[in-house]
Amino acid sequence: MDLLTKIIKATISEPNDMELGGIVRQLVNQWEHDEAKLGYEDAKIYESPDGGKTVYERPFGSGVSERKLVTDQLNLFDETN
């Protein structure tokens, strides 16, 4: 269901304007979040809370609870020089 249809249904079902405003804001925020993720479905976020000793990976747009420990790390820098 598209955003406009959701807003129309909410307008019909919610008589309280203040409550309706909250519903519309929530719908728009979710729509913006979904639009921002378009084209990045396979993108990953890499983070290290301890300065590089451990590295975690998670899908773009997901929360920290979805991160997984990366065990196969690339050696991006030649530290022999």
Image (cartoon, rainbow, N blue to C red):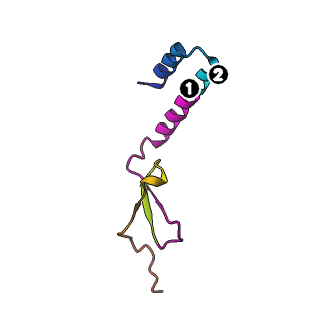
State the extent of the magenta-drawn residues as a range. 25-53
Residue 61 position (above or below residue 78): above
Residues at marks 1 and 2, CA–CA distance in whole angstroms: 9 Å
Q: Is residue 28 magenta?
A: yes
Residue shown at 48% from the left, 54% from the top: 64
Residue labelled with disc 1: 23
Residue shown at 46% from the left, 82% from the top: 79
In the image, is 20 to the left or to the right of 30? Answer: right
Three-letter amino acid code at disc 1?
Ile
| Quarter where residue 55 is shown | bottom left
Which numbered circle lies on residue 18? Answer: 2
> Is 45 in front, or is 25?
25
Q: Is residue 45 magenta?
A: yes
| Quarter where residue 54 is shown | bottom left
Where in the figure is residue 69, as x and y percent of width and height? 40, 64
For the residues bearing labels 1 and 2, Cβ distance under 8 angstroms: no
Residue shown at 55% from the left, 31% from the top: 26
> Is 32 in front, or is 24?
24
Where in the figure is residue 27, as x and y percent of width and height? 52, 29
Nearer the N terminus, badge 1 or badge 2? Answer: 2
Residue 33 position (above or below residue 9): below
Q: Secondary structure at mark 1?
A: helix
In the image, is 45 to the left or to the right of 23? Answer: left
Residue 72 position (above or below residue 27): below
Is the N terminus in the top left, top right, bottom left or bottom right quadrant?
A: top left
Where in the figure is residue 2, as x and y percent of width and height? 44, 25
Where in the figure is residue 9, as x and y percent of width and height? 48, 17
Find the residue positioned furthest to the left: 72
Q: Secondary structure at mark 2?
A: helix
Three-letter amino acid code at disc 2?
Met
